[in-house]
Image (spheres, helix red, strand yellow):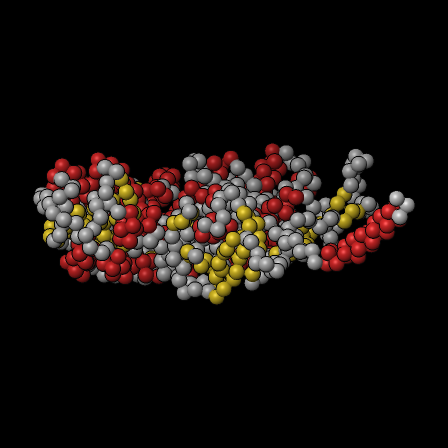
Amino acid sequence: MLLSAPLTAVWLVLLLSCGSEAKPNGSKTKKPKQVVPAIECDVRAGKINLPEFIAKCPSDCKQTKSQVYGTGVFASISSICNAAIHSGVITNSGGKVIVRKMAGQNIYKGSNSHGLRSLSLPKWRESFVVSVGKPKKGVIYPSSLDYIPSRPTYSKTGQKETKAPVVTTVMPATTPEPTRTTTPPPTTATTTPPPTTTTTLPPTTTTTTAKPRAAVHKARDTDSSHPYFASVAAASSARQSQNGHGKVTAQAIRGGTYTSRFPSRAKAGLRRPEAVGSPTIRRQPIPGHHSGTAFNRVVQMVPAERNQQQQQNNPSFSVREQDSLPRANPEPVTQGDPNCKVDIAWLMDGSWSIGKRRFKIQKDFLAEVAQVINVGMAGPMMGVIQYGDDPVTEFSLKAYTNSRELKPAIDKITQKGGMSNVGKALSYINKHYFSDANGNRGGAPNVAVVLVDGWPTDKVEEASRQARESGINIFFVTIEGPDENEKQNVVEPNFVDKAVCRTNGFYSLPVSSWFALRKAVQPLVKRVCDTDRLVCSKTCLNANDIAFVIDGSSSVGTGNFRTVLQFVANITREFEISDTDTRVGAVQYTYEQRLEFAFGQHNNKADLLNAIKRINYWSGGTSTGAAITYAAEQLFSKSKPNKRKIMIVITDGRSYDDVRAPALAVHRQGVIAYSIGIAWAAQDELEYIATDPDKEHSYFVDEFDSLYKFVPKVVNNICQEFNSQPRN
């Protein structure tokens, strides 16, 4: 017993010493923890100056609708988080992603995946791919993200504006501690409660709150919608800098008001506040207007107007007293009305017949529309073309990003003169105006509003048809049309009906006189902002060659075959049918194939619907692959080059032959293929037939009587796909 106690003590000492020696070695091999920086939903890959990095996305990024360009490989102007959702790397609940930059692509194809639609883009300088946010063993990514600065931010210091340094590195877990200033500036006498301290971020010397930072952040993020906004941001920054030095203050105020509504402002003896260069007036935002409000600008005045009215009512109220009032923080640049996201080209009549006075009324009308429509990057964008002998671009879609800037730009337009060559102007916008370089956003409907004094001096039908086939929604505003004695001088009678889609007057707005033009503002804005009708308007329904490939096998039966024909007729009714608009052909197949009627064989809707009704049920086997090849040879080989080729295959069972090779062949010919499966149709074959993405082009129902549900889906998808493609 006496010996065992010392031995136990010795063993304990040895164990403790070994443990203490092993501890430092163990700490050296401890795996470093990966810190994952958090990002916002709208952060684009191109704004982070790292070739490869890890980041954490928040939840609900789908709802932000931050845009994505491409499929699998994305343009660097895409939202990282929404690209990850589109790829299936994360869900809408957020998560970690790894981003790897790569070279730019010549084309980025849009698609619909995981409930999120990406847009197409012809070309971009840089790309990226996303993967699951689990780094490989031994790989540690940067714990902070190096952001590329987009523009300088400003903070107020007394009466002056000073540039604050741009923070380019954002730490994910913690934010820098602000330095505390215990001595207040000697020129400011402030009384605050004892526990309150004044905090400032270096190197500024005045108190800055979270609100101005949020405003600057929002203004910077407005550039995230499309590549052309990079140039817009540069121009906007230059204009803001110019305003900051007091050089164009008066223009900014005039751009946000309507001088004709306030005649008292022109009285002599009143010194306009903006002439003093007051920062209060210069930085005051102009209120935005929704298209549903009736000129509420009358009762909303900027401080300069309130100043003058108060001076008139109370002479003792001076500009100096107004300057002493609290000053509002600057608001971010207006985003526009998101419910009216359209790209609008206004075609002004600059012919000599209009006269200078009426030309001024036309400019006032456009200025008023610009205010009511609420121009902004997330809403409508607006450009102006003036036409006479030849069309001239006054400014492009991307030139001005808010209604306040548009007013002085419209005021500066001078009349060009000449004839009223509307047809030439429509050809011009179709070929040159709606391009990415001019600010066309691809996903927004293209709208052209033509203002005409009297009547055009050239033909418009062919030019307008080509413009409509290119996806342009054409509106005509005709003022003081020809009377009975003048109708003989009209080059093309009923030119409006020939120029616009034939939709019960939706696209035409006759105005009795120039002095009544102002009453047309609200009705016109309401129509051009009806994006649901524009996205699926007759514009996209008159530029197709549609082939129906109909299963006539014995498993269908006579009654169900009549139901299929009713489905075909219901889709056909939605389109404008003529040789210059949409043409429809039909093939019925069993083991063999039969051409029921070819493209252009029936050139009006009534004849076409009767032809569909007369198709006789055949009965037999099911060779869908051979039917697709037959439709390509008999119908699409004779399709017009300016028509979109659409094939709709309707089948109720598995094919006896291969459908993959024939489907791939027609896809390569540019045919957009839809597959409609009923009852025993094979899902894998439906997906082979359909154009990618399958979810948008392949449909299945358990019974024939449910086919009617897919009529609006098919028609709407044809229009959505047509309007979402950027024009070049």
**Residue 181 point in image, percent of width and height:** 79, 47
The answer to whether residue 683 is seen in the rendering is: yes
**Residue 169 point in image, percent of width and height:** 64, 56
Q: Residue at x 68, y 44 (%)?
A: 209
Q: Residue at x 19, y 43 (%)?
A: 568
Asked if 106 appears above or below 411 in the picture, the reply is: below
Residue placed most toward the observer, 44 or 116: 116
Residue placed most toward the observer, 363 or 84: 84
Q: Residue at x 36, y 43 (%)?
A: 531
Residue placed most toward the observer, 99 or 402: 99
Location of the C terminus by quadrant is bottom left
**Residue 608 point in image, percent of width and height:** 13, 46
Count of numbered labels shown in the rendering: 0
Asked if 40 appears above or below 667 in the picture, the reply is: above
Residue 654 vs residue 610: left or right?
A: right
Q: Residue at x 26, y 39 (%)?
A: 701
Asked if 54 appears above or below 505 in the picture, the reply is: below
Residue 259 vs residue 586: left or right?
A: right
**Residue 216 point in image, percent of width and height:** 60, 49
Residue 144 vs residue 622: left or right?
A: right
Residue 631 vs residue 717: left or right?
A: left
The answer to whether residue 580 is seen in the rendering is: no
Location of the N terminus by quadrant is top right
The image quarter containing residue 22 is bottom right
